[in-house]
Image (cartoon, grey):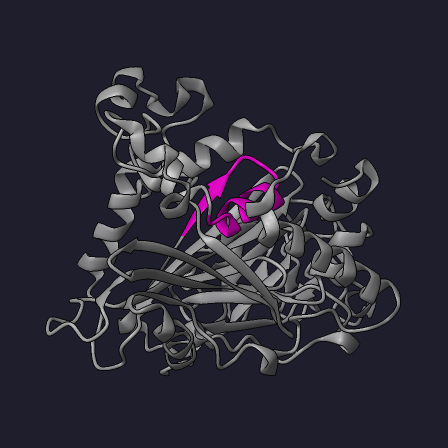
Amino acid sequence: MLSKQDNERVTRVSRGTPMGETLRRYWVPALLSSEIPEPDGDMARVRLLGEDLLAFRTTDGQAALTGALCPHRLAPLYFGRNEANGVRCVYHGWKFDSTGACIHMPTEPPDSSYKDRVRIDAYPTHEAGGVIWAYLGPEVHMPPPPDWELTRVPLEHSFVSRTVQDCNWLQALEGGLDSAHAMIMHNADGTNIDWIYDYDRLIPQIEVNPTEYGYSYTGIRERADDLWWVRLYQYFMPFTALRGRVSPLRGAKQPPAMPTMCGHIWVPADDVTTNVFNFIYAADPAIGMTREFAIENEIDDGRGPQHLTPDLRLKLGLHNDYSLSRELQKTGNFAGIVGINTQDVAVQEAMGPIVDRSQEHLGSTDRAIMQMRRMLLEAIGDVEAGRRPKGADTASYAQVRAVDHFVQGKENIARVLLEESKTRY
């Protein structure tokens, strides 16, 4: 559990809050590259860490992220014109470039210097992995751009989507780091649930190993005849989780058709809204990834195009109980809700906008969540003391990846983890 005070410190993200100032020391996913596809083309509204922003692609093809309002009369620049390496407000014609400088003010005399004293907020951007990343913190503390394996994979080997959840970012992140729930809530068997009493096979042996970027943690389950299901997750501070997709038994003649790495980045739009960047990429550089494969993966998880509203929220929600079926609970899957992603969102949103963690009763399988919370509080302390928070240093995480394998023989687990946790790109 967290005290009410610490819960406030880690959940609130607006500028000036402890967590808000801490998150601004990292590069943050702002939107997908595909959301502003063309130079001088459509612009996109962005809400990030409690700020309303505007994203556009300049004539030169660079991604820009600025304040959303014209400082003249606070008209929305989204209705403006994206032209000649700048955005022009259609109300009175004031124009701003990607650095936030006012470069034309037609309502003032040509010799006026007034425009030189007017600016809008503008943030550095970095485009990689199909994502436009932004840095919203002090320039003096800006770390090198993100360098996960995801950002180095050729675009034809990867796929990234964005969805929106109506809850605080931390409860969404905690769901992603919770290995114990996977075999329970996502179990496909709702008929004979004798499996729920098989503790040794149901509940993983969890070990959390702190690192310079966050931590890695393993979940190990024995299946049968000395066959072990080994999963090594990576948690990158402050809000990224990486996992593998289960592969056949090591040494089997038939390799997986599409070995993949996948995960999520849970980015606070504000205190009660989360932008979720869902990614998947080919684990083997020799195998590309078709868009059809990636979309099928999205559909299977319940976040395909047909599952989403235009604002990227699930069509299923609290208003219709996520299509919960009591009959399906008895005859189909354990949760009675179709789609792994939908199951996760249902639990996380139904907790309420911001969970009061002082009321929790954590158990032995919550080690990863407890460690993550400690690290977030430590990161807040580091920023308040003028230090760089853990995970902001690109070099600390650039060469690691997740593992998901069946391993024959417990004595082989350590070797497989060591061999498979290195990047390939």
Q: Is residue 144 above or below residue 266?
A: below
Residue drawn at x 39%, y 79% is 415
Residue 256 belongs to the span the image colors magenta: no
Residue in front for this viewpoint, 392 or 260: 260
Name the outermost residue toward the top.
327
Q: Position of residue 22 (x, y in %)?
A: 75, 60
The residue at 71%/67% (across/down) is 25
Q: Nearer the viewer, residue 84 or 148?
A: 148
| Side of 239 relative to 383 (left or right) | left
Q: Name above or below for residue 342 compared with residue 423.
A: above
Magenta region: 162-179
Location of residue 98 (image quadrant): bottom right
Q: Work out which quarter of the rendered image holds the N terminus and state it.
A: top right
Residue 170 to residue 378: above or below: above
> Percent x, y for residue 214?
62, 67
Indicate whether residue 176 is drawn in magenta: yes
Q: Position of residue 139 (x, y in %)?
A: 75, 74
Please give left or right for residue 175 compared with residue 33 in the image: right
Residue farthest front in this picture: 225
> Is residue 309 something one can see in this rendering?
no
Residue 90 in percent (x, y) is at: 58, 50
Q: Pick the quarter of the image with the C terminus.
A: bottom left
Residue at x-position 77% and y-position 64%: 109
* Horizontal arrangement in the rendering, residue 283 relative to residue 385 (left or right): left
Q: Residue at x 47, y 55 (%)?
A: 205
